[in-house]
Image (tube, rainbow, N blue to C red):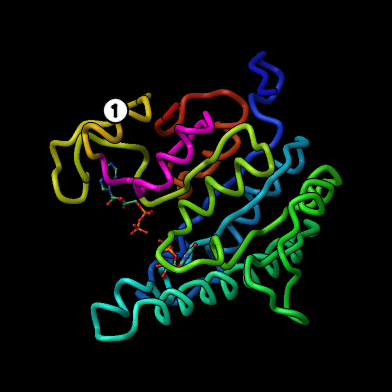
């Protein structure tokens, strides 16, 4: 159960979703090791105060099925490439976490013997309780889904207290802040408000899944140092959807 006293963390177990693009840093493609190290530091701070951390990583810094399909490729093949991209990001993230002395396991929705473990919910929960970071990669294992949906799915499965979506913007706005500089930020929204106002920060499937299972979502900017710790300790950060 989430707690809210001032000295107690608000959450005990979180599912953090990192977009692939967040890993690019200043580059147009790929992974910036400096960004990985910074994220490992932020995640390490949570582990240090006893928070259990599951991680879902996107693949948009490498491949997205929809973009490959727009360029003429078969959509399912493109989605398979996108899911494999999330495994590469997961391996890179594990490397950064382990260099920071944070025990980490990587589980893939698609079996990949010899490289990563196959996803096993009960095993994942045991590892989380042992204080390991568990990285869930290959999304849901199915084409036509996104890693936002995978984050909500895994968050619900492992009974996380919240899904924290780290992205390039510091919350949900009345319109895409990159396209409309007059857009205003919300501190809190209901799932139905996000759906009714068509706020595009997360895909519909992910929002519906979270709504149906009462999973709180928080959208925040991972580039703000300490943001993750502020969220779990109950300070104001990003936008809460519940
Ligand atoms: N109402 C909105 N509030 C905040 N961000 C929005 C909104 N509508 C669209 N966005 C866009 O959603 C992006 C965050 O989604 P994310 O999944 O991290 O990116 P991407 O879809 O590029 O992987 C932001 O960079 C922002 O440009
Ligand atoms: O369950 C899933 C999750 C992801 N993907 C594919 O993997 C790509 C990368 O994931 P996503 O776009 O969600 O990454 P992010 O935007 O978070 O970087 C997607 O575009 C899809 O092609 C998929 O097919 N099924």
- The quadrant in which the N terminus is found is top right
| Residue drawn at 29 percent across, 27 percent down | 193
Magenta-drawn stretch contains 209: yes
In magenta, the rendered stretch is 199-219
| Residue drawn at 48 percent across, 33 percent down | 212
- The quadrant in which the C terminus is found is top left
Left or right of 65 on screen, residue 151: right
| Residue corresponding to mark 1 | 193
Say if 190 sits above or below 134 in the image.
above
Image quadrant where residue 221 sits: top left
Left or right of 31 on screen, residue 9: right
Q: Nearer the viewer, residue 19 or 28?
A: 19
For the view shown, which residue lies furthest in the bottom direction?
A: 72
Residue 17 at x, y = what percent? 53, 51
Q: Nearer the viewer, residue 205 or 30?
A: 205
Q: Nearer the viewer, residue 143 or 40?
A: 143
Ligand 1 is within 8 Å of the C-beta of the residue at disc 1: no
Left or right of 111 on screen, residue 31: left
Magenta-drawn stretch contains 155: no
Say if 180 sits above or below 147 in the image.
above
10 Å crowding of disc 1: few (<14), some (14-19), many (20+): few
Image quadrant where residue 88 sits: bottom right
| Residue drawn at 35 percent across, 49 percent down | 203
Left or right of 113 on screen, residue 195: left
Ligand 2, image quadrant it occupies: bottom left
Residue 105 at x, y = what percent? 76, 62
Residue 33 at x, y = what percent? 56, 71
């Amino acid at each position: 159960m989430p707690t809210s006293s001032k000295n107690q963390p608000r959450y005990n177990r979180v599912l953090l979703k990192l977009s692939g693009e967040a890993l690019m840093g200043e580059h147009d493609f790929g992974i910036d090791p400096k960004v990985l190290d910074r994220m490992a530091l932020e995640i390490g701070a949570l582990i240090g105060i006893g928070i259990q951390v599951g991680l879902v990583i996107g693949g948009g810094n490498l491949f997205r099925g929809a973009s490959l399909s727009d360029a003429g490729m078969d959509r399912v093949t493109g989605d398979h490439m996108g899911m494999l991209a999330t495994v590469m990001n997961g391996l890179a993230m594990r490397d950064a976490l382990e260099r920071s002395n944070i025990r980490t396991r990587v589980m893939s929705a698609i079996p990949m013997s010899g490289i990563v473990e196959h996803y096993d919910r009960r095993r994942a929960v045991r590892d989380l309780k042992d204080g390991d970071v568990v990285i869930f990669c290959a999304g849901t294992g199915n084409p036509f889904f996104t890693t936002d949906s995978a984050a909500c799915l895994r968050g619900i499965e492992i009974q996380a207290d919240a899904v924290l979506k780290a992205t390039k913007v510091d919350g949900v706005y009345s319109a895409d802040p990159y396209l409309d500089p007059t857009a205003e930020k919300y501190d809190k929204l209901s799932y139905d408000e996000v759906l009714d106002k068509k706020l595009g920060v997360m895909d519909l499937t992910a929002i519906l899944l979270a709504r149906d299972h009462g999973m709180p979502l928080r959208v925040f900017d991972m580039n703000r140092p300490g943001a993750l710790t502020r969220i779990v300790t109950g300070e104001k950060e990003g936008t809460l959807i519940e």
